[in-house]
Image: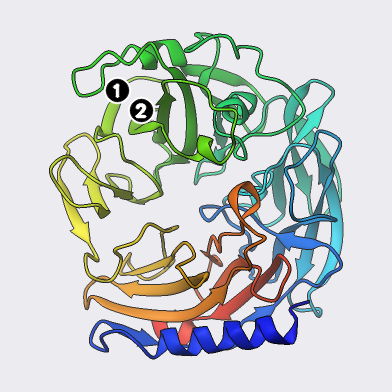
Amino acid sequence: MMDRRTFLRSYSLMVAALSSGPTWLSTAATRQAVRITEGPGGHWFGYYDKWQVDPSGRYALGCKVTFEDRSPRDSDRLEIGLIDLQEGNRWEKIGESRAWGWQQSCMLQWIPGSAGEVIWNDREDETYVSRIYQLRSGQTRTLPQPVYALSPDGSFAVGTAFNRIQNLRPGYGYAGIPDPYREQKAPGEIGLYTMDLRTGRTNQLLNLADLARIPHSGTDVSDNWHWLNHMLVSPDSRRLLFLHRWRPEILENQLMARTGFVTRMITVDTTGKDLYVADPSGNSSHFVWRDSQHIFVWTRPEGREAGFWLIEDKTGEMERIGAEAMDRNGHNTYVPHTNQEWVLNDTYPDKERLITLYLYHIPSKRKIILGKFYSPTRFFGEWRCDLHPRCDQQGRRVFFDSTHEGSRQMYFLDISDIVGT
């Protein structure tokens, strides 16, 4: 638990921060954050672009570990839990995982369109797999590949080699299975694949060797170390979106490995054809689909300022969103059932170690700060705790991970009175 001195410091910083800033642009809407997990042990969900809460709004998913301040080892097991939000936030263990990281956990999520199926990644001997848990029967079945993201129609997953990610971007892949192509800069055997969630049938769509041969700003980048990261499927389940990254050398220092790479954002259809470099700037970061033609991404387009940009797939047309209010990188999504008018977002810790959670209304250019949450200094680097805010499927509550009370736990805030859902 947070000691009294830390609590008072955090509270005073929060109040001071919320009372500052231009009132025409930023409105404070502080409200009590409801904690839904308790120690001992750290609890969190993972990434911001996945469904944590089931369609009924009753059950939330979460992960639990007994430590919080070191990298996972291959022997560390993550407990998967189902939280009954209508029964005192009762935690029920539904499984375990040995394939996880601090930022994205084990890709735990509800399968879209399903009222009773949950999926996460795991490890069997020297193979990464995925598990699908059926809530009603309590049965679990195994698919032969791990997943990164799921199609909105719930029929397939998209994925890549997680040991390759761990080799080149520590903390976003998994411990336990070394990258078999660690001596190769752009292996042709791995890349982007899709997997049928019913049968487990897997199709390799793109490989790193082919992607490495695509010039960047007219320059050959094949003589670099290449990998893929951050994937999403378009709302109509017809196009895939991912980041292709490369660095000139492998860095042993994990803190240094957070920088020094180049990123381009690419779309492709579900057969691996019709490839398009949607953001060739080399600066793509967090993103989400607005609709099946537009991508909402933090980037710095060539010749323009860094910010959140709405980019049209396959045309390159773009416009800046929230230039004054959203001038810092964060984990951006649209609030469901608001006609993409409301954006949910957060920031990284500022100089006072405060993380801002906020809403932004695009038509009125109004920013509403939901709260500022202190991040203790011991949560840094790979085991930092970003809020990674995500809405429930009704668009009424915001769920997030936070360490502002001294340990990694999960919380929610009701936003229904703000967004009108």
The answer to whether residue 1 is left or right of residue 291 is right
Q: Which residue is drawn at 71% across and 43% down?
A: 120
The picture places residue 415, in percent across and down from the top left corner, at 49, 81
Q: Which of 116 and 301 is in front in this view?
A: 301
- Work out whether residue 270 can be spotted: no
| Residue at screen point 58% across, 87% down | 11
Q: Which mark is residue 268?
A: 2
Q: What element carries label 2?
A: strand
Q: Residues within 10 Å of mark 2 (few under 14, many from 20)?
A: many
Q: Residues within 10 Å of mark 1 (few under 14, many from 20)?
A: few
Left/right of residue 288 with respect to residue 38 in the rendered view: left
Residue situated in front as seen by the camera: 192 or 184: 184
* Residue shown at the point (73%, 27%) measured from the top left: 128
Which quarter of the figure has residue 169? top right
Position of the N terminus, as image quadrant, is bottom right
> Residue tagged by mark 1?
274
